[in-house]
Image: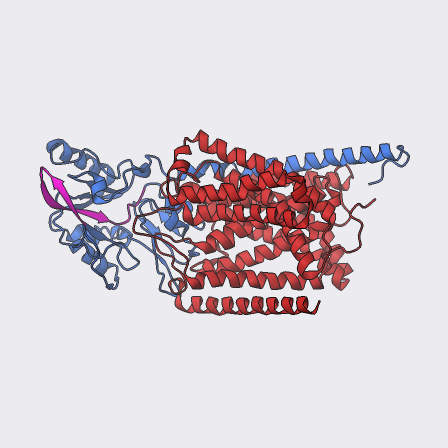
Chain colours: A red, B blue
Amino acid sequence: MKAKSLNLLSGQSVIWFLAVLGLVLIVYRFVMGLGAVTNLSDGYPWGIWIGLDILAGIALAAGGFVMAGTVYLLGGQRFHVMARTAVLTAFLGYLLFIFGLIVDLGRPWNIWKPVFNWQHESPMFEVSWCVMLYTFVLFLEMLPSVFERYRLEKLHSLWRMMVPWLIVFILGLFTLAMTHSPQWALAMVAVLLVWEGLIRLRIMPRHAEVSILLIAAGVILSTLHQSSLGSLFLIVPHKLHALWHTPILPLLFFFSAVMVAPAMVIFESLVTERTLGYKAHLDLLHAAARVMPYLLGVYLFLKLADLVGRGAVPHALALTPQAVSWWMEMGIGAVIPLVLFMTPELIRNRAGLFGTSVLVIAGVVWNRLNVAVVGVIVRPWETYYPYWAEVFITVGIISVGLLAFRWAMRNLPIHVEGESPHPA
Amino acid sequence: MKALLIDVTRCVGCRGCQVACKEWNELPAEKTRFFASPKGYQNPRDLSSKTWRVVTYNEAQTNGRFEWVFGHLQCFHCIEPSCATACPVSALQKTKEGPVVYDPDRCLGCRYCQLACPFLVPRFEWDKAIPKITKCTMCADRVAAGEEPACAKVCPTDAIVFGEREDLIAEAENRIHRNPRGYVHHIYGKDEVGGTCVLHLSNVPFEVLGYRTDLPKISLREYTKTAMQVVPHVKIGLAVALGAVSWVIQRRIRNGRDEKNGSSSGGES
């Protein structure tokens, strides 16, 4: 017992050390410029910060919208106990992502410019709006826990009153920004207003604690955000390797994010059980694990059908670093976990469940790194490997996230203890 | 639309254009190094935030003998530039007159333009705390004042000429027509990525000069167009679909519950 707490303590001081080291390097980056802390170049303007912190980070934060959608829209009420943790992870993930983005952007003081300069042809414009709006939606989803914790009933009722209107406004504005067409924006507003009206008339489902419209906005914005990160790479048919450049890249990005969500929920539950001592709801984790073979199967099918359809199979059989990386991605992240998730004996025990989920997560991270870094080919003499400071800045940002997660789990009513997983 | 026609058969590799470009745009010198053959005389190796125009040195075989053929690296000022499509805030914009110009006041420094450009033209100031994206502007300030770009102005052999794009295409076709053996029968930039405002003529295949010859004939914007156009459809479709599905599921759950309770206490929500 004593040894274990000591162990945890030293583990924690390592995380603090890495967080501080990362922050120091970030200060240095802002004084000296990006070149001083990265190996990025004009040929490889995007490196592991985009691949890991942003593409992979956002994919792994998909647990938030998938869980919230499952619980409040798709009738998965029994997962209710896990929804708040997933939303917290997503919210912290997005805050970290914005923090990482500020470090990566060359001129971060202009980060707000997309609000006013509308350029709806750019996938990056869509990405930037999705980040802003979905972070705001997650913030709104988080607020009730804060209100409960500090007993702010007045603010809580104000929140209940305001949220649907805020959602109608931001989604309407976003539609206007993406189309420059008042008709489209009005259509979006009308659909949402009808929905909210039907909720108030008790025709559409309602929920005592949350705003259904808020949850729906989270799902819509996440769907667009996950897929638009894939759309970013459509414009580089001349640089991205044929193994990954496909017109359905947005769909693949979206689907793999949904696929990684249950794996992330399993991973988080088991890790918080181990480190923070909150009991994991094993029955729910098993239910989540039972969905995985279907998700992995569809994903594998999409990936392979796309490859065959585009006639890109020979690229997978050539002996290139890209092909090797593709096989690793598919093997570790899709084929092996598919087999393992269909092996009941393995999934029934904690270690098997944990290990298999880690494989799926690693596969998605690997996929994003492949798209952002490994698959990008410019000229023979240009290469990119992350500089040590680049790695430690990423590690530092993740460490800050772990510390924030721990603080929130301890201080906010996130984990619903003692509540029956099957509310009558 | 204004354009530049670069005829590499007329270029003698004096690099006056490179110097004039630096002078007009007040770009600093940069420390360069000798690099491996076959381009040993070239200086510097590549474009950078301090060098917006480079004459490349290529040893090529023409008519059975070796000679230097000089390629030209600079912004192509595409008709539908992928950098401008990529830029989320229109910091990079195509002007009516032809040049693709940059406004640092809007730029976030996301460097998506660098990824999107098929010619690897936009360059970032990696060594600065307040960096900018830099590239050839076709001397947009000079063009606006009715002057020709510095590189065309200074070229002693008229290897670089400035004019209306249609006129230059006609001129290029004319030159090929008059001297069919002296040219590769292709105007580089006429159709590449939907057409560019910098056109090249050469007497050796363009890949020998290091130009990409595998680029599509359509603008790269076409590759993202569909994905961007479906966004409003997805948004509204998803809202309707989510509403409908949640309604159906809720009904099912309620009906199931009523059946279990012997439909005694129906109607609670």
Task: Give the percent coordinates (x, y) of residue A59.
Answer: 55, 48
Q: Closest to the observer: A42 or A324?
A: A324
- Which residue sits furthest right? B264
For the N terminus of chain B, the quadrant is top left
Q: Quadrant of residue B182?
A: top left
**What span is colored magenta in the figure?**
B57-78
> In the rendered structure, does residue B208 fall within the stretch colored magenta?
no
User: Residue visible at 54% across and 45% down?
Assistant: A226
User: Residue visible at 67% across and 42% down?
Assistant: A345
Residue A386 in the figure: left or right of residue B190: right
Evaluate whether residue B87 shows in this view.
no
Vertical side of B113 occupied by B247: above or below:
above
Label count reads 0
Residue A83 in the figure: left or right of residue A386: right
Residue A376 in the figure: left or right of residue B231: left
Evaluate whether residue B28 shows in this view.
yes
Q: Quadrant of residue B76?
A: top left
> In the rendered structure, does residue B58 fall within the stretch colored magenta?
yes
**Main SS of the magenta segment?**
strand
User: Residue visible at 49% across and 33% down?
Assistant: A304
Vertical side of A407 occupied by A60: above or below:
above
For the C terminus of chain B, the quadrant is top right
Q: Closest to the observer: A356 or A237?
A: A356
Task: Give the percent coordinates (x, y) of residue A10.
Answer: 60, 69
Q: Quadrant of residue B264?
A: top right
Task: Give the percent coordinates (x, y) of residue A84.
Answer: 70, 52
Q: Closest to the observer: A28 or A140?
A: A28
Task: Give the percent coordinates (x, y) of residue A3.
Answer: 67, 68
